[in-house]
Amino acid sequence: MIKATVASDLQTVWDCWTKPEHVMKWNHASSDWECPHAENDLRVGGRFLYTMAAKDGSAAFDFEGTYADVTPLALIAYVMDDGRKVQTTFSEKNGYTSSQLSI
């Protein structure tokens, strides 16, 4: 389980987590990687695809899955293409948004 709390309202965090133009700015493991492409059809049965790539061009892969449950501003559950199930919940309190990811 991974937990994170940020000093931002829930709508802003939700948008940054789900909109491709935002995902491309943060979805990389280190500063020498990037996310040059992102697609997101955020609905039950919809799919996401995020391309992860080394900035030097030495490696790249696609991270993909299908949404199993979506409750706007509260829950995103999906199944990765390798069969693993992931669930992320969101909540806001006093101007801080918390998320909890479980695999």
Image: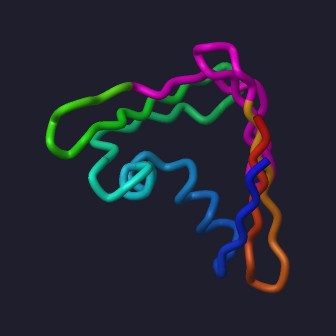
Residue at the limit of the structure toward the left, as seen here = 56
Nearer to us in this view, 101 or 49 = 101
Residue at the limit of the structure toward the bottom, as seen here = 94
Please report the residue visible at 79 percent of the width from the left and 43 percent of the height from the top: 71
- On the picture, is 47 further left or further right than 103? left
Q: Residue 79, position in %: x, y?
A: 69, 22
Please report the residue visible at 67 percent of the width from the left and 19 percent of the height from the top: 45
Please report the residue visible at 29 percent of the width from the left and 29 percent of the height from the top: 60
Nearer to us in this view, 40 or 2 = 2
Vertical order, 102 against 29 (above or below) = above
Residue 15 position by quadrant: bottom right
Q: Residue 94, position in %: x, y?
A: 82, 85
Vertical order, 36 against 25 (above or below) = above
Q: Main secondary structure of the magenta part?
A: strand
Nearer to us in this view, 2 or 80 = 2
Please report the residue visible at 70 percent of the width from the left and 21 percent of the height from the top: 84
Vertical order, 103 against 44 (above or below) = below
Magenta span includes 73: yes
Magenta span includes 65: yes
Q: Which residues are magenta?
A: 62-85
Q: Residue 82, position in %: x, y?
A: 61, 14
Nearer to us in this view, 54 or 20 = 54
Vertical order, 77 against 18 (above or below) = above
How many labels sit on residues?
A: 0
| Snapshot colouring | rainbow
Quadrant including the C terminus: top right
- On the picture, is 54 further left or further right than 82? left
Residue 30 position by quadrant: bottom left
